[in-house]
Image (cartoon, rainbow, N blue to C red):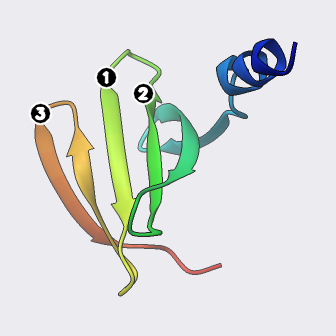
Amino acid sequence: MIIESLALALAAPQPTHSFDHRGYTYSYVETTDEKGRTVYTGTREDGVAFEFTLLDNGVVTGKVGSRSVRFRAPHD
């Protein structure tokens, strides 16, 4: 019973977030990697996959489709 409950909890969908940029809507989940960095993984509304990693210095690196990207994270 405990193992089944744990399996269900691990399989539960993570909350999805979204943002708009240059006419596209991006949907993503937020996780933490083994180094404690925030990772955003998702898809653009046209199906293009992306993954961004927020580095300690406030720079974001990653890929949108096969294109590498790097930019400074926006401040609130």
Residue drawn at point x = 62 percent, y = 39 percent: 18
The CA span between labels 3 and 2 is: 13 Å
The CA span between labels 2 and 1 is: 5 Å
Q: Which residue matches tag 2?
A: 44
* Image location (x, y in percent) of residue 33: 42, 56
Residue drawn at point x = 50 percent, y = 34 percent: 26
- Asked if disc 2 and disc 1 are in contact, CB closer than 8 Å, the reply is yes
* Image location (x, y in percent) of residue 74: 50, 74
Q: Nearer the viewer, residue 18 or 56?
A: 56
Q: Is residue 75 above or below residue 34?
A: below
Q: Is residue 67 left or right of residue 18?
A: left
Query: Which mark is on residue 66?
Result: 3
Image quarter in which the N terminus is found: top right
Q: Residues within 10 Å of mark 3 (few under 14, many from 20)?
A: few
Q: Is residue 47 above or below residue 70?
A: above
Query: Which mark is on residue 48?
Result: 1
